[in-house]
Image: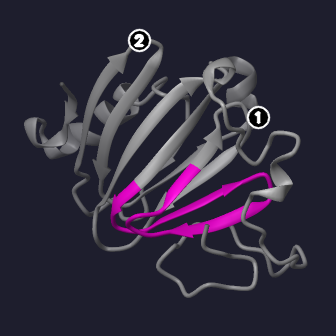
Amino acid sequence: KTVFDSERLAVDDRVDAWAEATGTEPVTTGTAFPDPARPFTARIGAARLGHVHLASVSHSPLLARRTPKMIRQSDPEHYALALVRTGTLGFEQARTTCLLTPGNFFLYDGSRPFTVSATADRPVASLLLVSPNGSCPCRPPSSPGWSRYRCRAPRASASRRRAPSSPSRSRSSSQTSC
């Protein structure tokens, strides 16, 4: 079922409607838009399958952050598995930065801070499968024991480390593909 479609809204109302529609699902994030002069487009389709939430999300460039303050205010304690279908996403959590392209999966912990960026010129589409922590048989990077499995970014000095604000840039020494 479609829960958000920006094409049904006036261009000036889209950003506020996106913030309202994504305010708590699957987790609270703060969103910024790299090109405010460009009309924002997005679509979300969602379904619940018992305790699991499935969503198909597509959107034009944006930067979303989940901060420690947001986690303290609302922590649904879930993991999410995402598949990038089109476009490029930058993702950072637990000191690991990944550049994700179509066909890449990533697993994240909604109880830990993260940053997601889609700043290339073309829209990004992904599928999300969100499950409560207790029902997921695998663990994301913030969980004990994950270090054997996670992608490892080379250590870089703080001055060289970049947030994934522009996944279209070439990879730096602090970025790796998961």
Question: x and y percent of residue 24 in the render?
Answer: 49, 23
Q: Residue at x 40, y 64 (%)?
A: 103
Identity of the amino acid at label 2? Answer: Gly
Name the image quarter holding residue 84: bottom left
Say left or right for 63 vs 10: right
Image x and y of residue 51, in percent: 47, 13
Check if residue 41 falls in the magenta segment.
no
- How far from the left and from the top, in percent, is residue 164? 61, 67
Q: Label 1, on which residue? A: 68
The magenta segment is 84-106
Q: Which mark is residue 50?
A: 2
Is label 1 in a helix, a strand or a loop? helix
Pair 1/2: label in front:
2
Residue under the point 41% across and 11% down: 50
Q: Is residue 30 above or below residue 159?
A: above
- Classify residue 132 by image quadrant: top right
Specify whether 32 is left or right of 140.
Answer: left
Sort mark 1 into few (<14), some (14-19) or many (20+) by Cα contacts within 10 Å. Answer: some
Tell me whether the residue at label 1 lies in contact with that at label 2, contact meaning CB atoms closer than 8 angstroms: no
Earlier in the chain: of badge 1 and badge 2, it is 2
Q: Is residue 100 magenta?
A: yes
Instruction: Report if residue 74 is visible in the image.
Output: no
- For residue 18, say whether it is visible: yes
Hey, which residue is sitting farthest top in the picture? 50
